[in-house]
Amino acid sequence: MSLAKAFFDVGLFTNQRDAQQRFWSEQVGLPFDHTLKLGGGILQHRYSVSAQQTPLLRSVVF
């Protein structure tokens, strides 16, 4: 498969923001990047995944 860019975004929704932020930053070890306001009171908290972290993320998510 050929992608238009060298990365892609994955989005998850939760009603337990604090627990999810702790999970992705402390347990998985992803660095927090920034927060976007999407409208309607929805915030998107973005974390970065490097090529070296991809196998780790794959084992956590799948």
Image: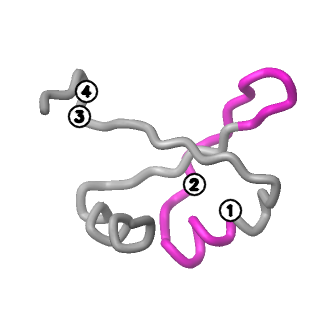
| Residue 53 - label | none
Which residue is most to the bottom? 27
Tell me the kind of residue under disc 3: Ala
In percent of the image, x 61 and y 42: which residue is there?
34
| Residue 6 - label | 3
Tell me the kind of residue under disc 1: Gln
Q: What is the CA distance from the residue labelled 4 to the residue labelled 2? A: 21 Å
Q: What is the CA distance from the residue labelled 1 to the residue labelled 2? A: 9 Å
**Is residue 19 toward the left or the right of residue 11 in the image?**
right
Q: What crowding class fits label 2: few (fewer than 14 Cα within 10 Å), some (14-19), or many (20 or more)? A: some
The residue that disc 2 covers is 32
**Residue 26 or 60: which is nearer the viewer?**
60
- Are dots 1 and 2 in contact, CB under 8 Å? yes
Q: Quadrant of residue 3?
A: top left
Q: Position of residue 24 (x, y in %)?
A: 57, 65
| Residue 5 - label | 4
Q: Earlier in the sequence, mark 1 or mark 2?
A: 1
- Are dots 3 and 1 in contact, CB under 8 Å? no
- Are dots 4 and 3 in contact, CB under 8 Å? yes
The residue that disc 1 covers is 21
In percent of the image, x 30 and y 37: which residue is there?
7
Tell me the kind of residue under disc 4: Lys
SS at mark 3 in the image: loop
In percent of the image, x 49 and y 63: which residue is there?
30
Q: What crowding class fits label 3: few (fewer than 14 Cα within 10 Å), some (14-19), or many (20 or more)? A: few
Q: Is residue 39 magenta?
A: yes
Q: Earlier in the sequence, mark 4 or mark 1?
A: 4
Vertical placement of 36 versus 59: above or below? above
SS at mark 2 in the image: strand
Quadrant containing the N terminus is top left
Span of residues in magenta: 21-43
Q: Position of residue 53 (x, y in %)?
A: 32, 65
